[in-house]
Image: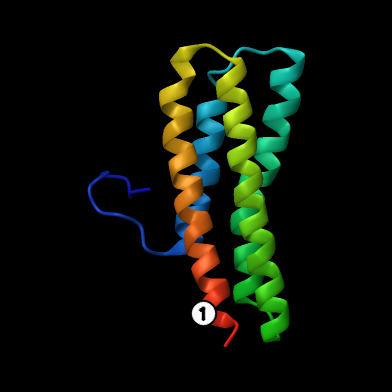
């Protein structure tokens, strides 16, 4: 994800996860409203927002164990967001694929960053 001028990447993970959650919400505004889409969108909204919320909690943790647990939860929520994005893009028309692919790529990058933090924090 990049900042407002779309030229330089965002390196602050709290800001990057916030931007991801915001981009998901903007993207979902264009989806057709069906019962399945509405329910899947709710799940995606929760999981995309939880990535950043749990990462913020991890940064405020009192112990290394709590830190690792919160980062692992953030990673789990990133994986869940990928799942819901894939599902929504598969069951809707092709016009949504480009936007969902961009968001899936961002969620994968965030997941990889969180995995790296977990690996480096174990020692």
Total marks shown come to 1
In the rendered image, residue 7, in percent from the top left (x then y), is placed at 22, 48
Residue at 42% of width from left, 64% of height from top? Answer: 12
Residue 49, percent from left and from top: 63, 48
Q: Position of residue 63 (x, y in %)?
A: 70, 86
Residue 10 appears in the figure = yes
Query: SS class of the residue under badge 1?
Result: helix
Quadrant for the C terminus, please. Answer: bottom right
| Residue matched to label 1 | 120
Q: Residues within 10 Å of mark 1 (few under 14, many from 20)?
A: few
Q: Is residue 38 left or right of residue 123?
A: right
Nearer to us in this view, 40 or 23: 40
Q: Is residue 95 left or right of residue 85?
A: left
Is 106 in front, or is 59? Answer: 106
Q: Is residue 101 left or right of residue 31?
A: left
Question: Image point 66% across, 44% down: which residue?
Answer: 80
| The quarter of the displayed image where residue 81 is located | top right
Colouring mode (rainbow / by chain / secondary structure / one colour): rainbow
Q: Position of residue 27 (x, y in %)?
A: 51, 28
Residue 53 makes an appearance in the image? no
Q: Residue at x 70, y 43 (%)?
A: 46
Q: Residue at x 52, y 72 (%)?
A: 117
């Amino acid at each position: 994800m990049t900042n407002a001028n779309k030229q330089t990447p965002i390196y602050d993970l709290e800001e990057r996860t916030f931007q991801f959650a915001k981009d998901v919400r903007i993207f979902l505004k264009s989806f057709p409203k069906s019962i399945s889409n509405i329910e899947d969108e709710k799940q995606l909204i929760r999981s995309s927002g939880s990535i950043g919320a749990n990462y913020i909690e991890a940064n405020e943790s009192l112990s290394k164990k709590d830190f690792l647990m919160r980062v692992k939860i953030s990673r789990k929520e990133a994986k869940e967001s990928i799942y819901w994005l894939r599902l929504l893009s598969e069951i809707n028309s092709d016009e949504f694929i480009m936007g969902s692919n961009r968001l899936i790529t961002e969620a994968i990058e965030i997941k990889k960053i969180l995995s790296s933090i977990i690996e480096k924090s174990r020692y």
